[in-house]
Image (cartoon, rainbow, N blue to C red):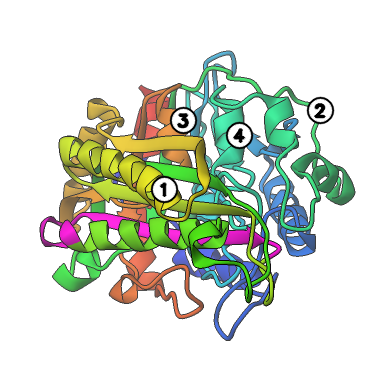
């Protein structure tokens, strides 16, 4: 039997769960500072697992700390339909980014229990490790590892600014699991997430049908120069790596302004240097930047411009440059059948609905390489996010969660 069309998630119960999560890893007023694999991440993982067990879900943890909570299907040998996102936040993060997707998945399972509904296929809820990359670079390391984009050893060896690795921190907080962090079949993956942009809120839309993502390229660039005294050393002999990094990042920002008219974005996000002290020139710097555009061709042109800017910046500062890491995400990666199902479900439930492209990185992009995937967006006030002022009300999230419920159950019962 199918799920009754009148079935709805319990927004009050969901909200109590969101509020409890919002007490763990409190940051600036109203926000969270719950960096991956820190003590607060451990606490929210513990609480999440306790909730899952209370809801009758069985919990497994893999070698990179991804948590999978499973609700068996009538035919439990079939691959699961999976929901989820991430419980970690940026250093100045909000209470909803990622969290609404994980706890929303849990709420779907609780709703099915209350209705006594057993799906044909199993359903799982996942919390991916280190989605944000706010402590360990790169972001989306848990989903990247699970889908085979990164090897486990490489991922475990990523270091934070204090030199601690993901592997050490997983051991410290007790979340290096037994299950292998390798691809296993998913029937489908559906990620519910706040939009993290202003479009749905501005237009009074309740549900965003995510048809794909901005084509995006990120780069980690290293510059090497030479230390010297800041006083007597002649200008023409200076090889200041800090300046090479700074010139690159300003060029990237200029590129963003050049493409702003067509909605393009280019971001200078991070510059570190050594020794980075007064009185001495830095002989090492690393800069992180990215470009994003709805049009893949324009995005590729922008990425090429960044590569050129790397060499120009290095030449101007008489440094050497190496692009250490390049990552790409976005594009038309989601499954048409799932996009259509989300759209039809949302319209069928009577919600104000529009198609939308994601402009942020999400675990869904990695999972899409592995299984049919899509995303559902909910509005957040003014599009403010990665900021303690990030705000959603129950009214903002309830429609998207009901779309998640009906989409996932229809898929699991087909
Ligand atoms: Zn997120």
CA separation, marks 1 and 4? 57 Å
Q: Which residues are magenta?
A: 258-275
Quadrant of the rendered image containing residue 195: bottom left
Report if the CB atoms under discs 3 and 2 are less than 8 Å apart. no
Depth-wise, is mark 1 or mark 4 nearer the camera?
A: 1
Q: Is residue 283 above or below residue 24?
A: above
Which one is in front, 261 or 364? 261
Report if the CB atoms under discs 1 and 3 are less than 8 Å apart. no
Q: Is residue 367 above or below residue 399?
A: above
Q: Earlier in the sequence, mark 1 or mark 4?
A: 4
**Residue 261 drawn at (x, y percent):** 11, 61
Residue visible at 71% across and 59% down in the picture? 44
Residue visible at 59% across and 27% down in the picture? 150
Q: Is residue 61 left or right of residue 369?
A: right
State the SS at label 1: helix
CA separation, marks 3 and 2? 21 Å
According to the picture, the residue beneath numbered tag 3 turns out to be 367
- The numbered mark at residue 227 is none
Depth-wise, is mark 4 or mark 2 nearer the camera?
A: 2
Q: Earlier in the sequence, mark 4 or mark 3?
A: 4
According to the picture, the residue beneath numbered tag 1 turns out to be 315
Which one is in front, 361 or 364? 361
- The numbered mark at residue 178 is 2
Q: Earlier in the sequence, mark 4 or mark 2?
A: 4
Q: Earlier in the sequence, mark 1 or mark 3?
A: 1
> Would you say residue 268 sits in the magenta stretch?
yes
**Residue 87 drawn at (x, y percent):** 60, 55
């Amino acid at each position: 039997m199918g799920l009754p069309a009148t079935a709805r998630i319990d927004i009050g119960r969901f909200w109590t769960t969101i509020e409890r999560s919002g007490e763990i890893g409190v940051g600036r007023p109203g926000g969270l500072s719950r960096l991956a694999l820190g003590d607060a991440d451990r606490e929210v993982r513990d609480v999440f697992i306790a909730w899952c067990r209370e809801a009758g879900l069985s919990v497994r943890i893999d070698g990179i700390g991804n948590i999978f909570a499973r609700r068996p299907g009538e035919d439990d040998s079939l691959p699961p339909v999976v929901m989820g996102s991430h419980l970690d936040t940026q250093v100045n993060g909000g209470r909803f980014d990622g969290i609404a997707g994980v706890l929303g998945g849990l709420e779907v399972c609780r709703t099915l229990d209350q209705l006594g509904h057993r799906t044909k296929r199993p359903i799982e809820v996942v919390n991916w490790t280190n989605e944000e990359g706010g402590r360990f670079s790169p972001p989306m390391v848990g989903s990247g590892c699970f889908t085979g984009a990164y090897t486990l050893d490489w991922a475990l060896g990523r270091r934070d600014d204090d030199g601690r690795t993901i592997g050490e921190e997983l051991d410290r907080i007790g979340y290096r699991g037994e299950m292998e962090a390798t691809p296993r079949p998913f029937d489908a993956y559906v990620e519910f997430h706040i939009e993290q942009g202003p479009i749905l809120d501005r237009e009074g839309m309740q549900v965003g049908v995510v048809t794909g993502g901005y084509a995006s390229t990120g780069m980690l660039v290293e510059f090497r120069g030479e230390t010297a005294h800041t006083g007597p050393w002649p200008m023409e002999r200076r090889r200041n790596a800090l300046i090479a990094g700074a010139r690159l990042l300003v060029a990237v920002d200029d590129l963003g302004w050049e493409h702003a008219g067509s909605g393009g974005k280019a971001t200078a996000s991070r510059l570190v240097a050594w020794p980075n002290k007064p009185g001495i020139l830095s002989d090492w710097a690393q800069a992180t930047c990215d470009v994003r555009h709805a049009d893949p061709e324009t995005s590729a042109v922008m990425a090429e411009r960044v590569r050129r800017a790397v060499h120009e910046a290095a030449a101007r500062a008489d440094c050497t440059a190496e692009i250490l890491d390049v990552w790409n995400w976005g594009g038309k990666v989601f499954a048409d059948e799932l996009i259509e199902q989300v759209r039809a479900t949302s319209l069928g439930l009577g919600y104000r609905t529009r198609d939308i492209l994601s402009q942020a990185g999400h675990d869904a992009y990695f999972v899409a390489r592995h299984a049919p995937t899509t995303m559902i967006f909910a509005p957040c006030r003014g599009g403010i996010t990665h900021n303690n002022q990030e705000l959603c009300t129950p009214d903002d999230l309830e429609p998207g969660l009901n779309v998640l419920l009906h989409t996932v159950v229809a898929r699991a019962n087909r």
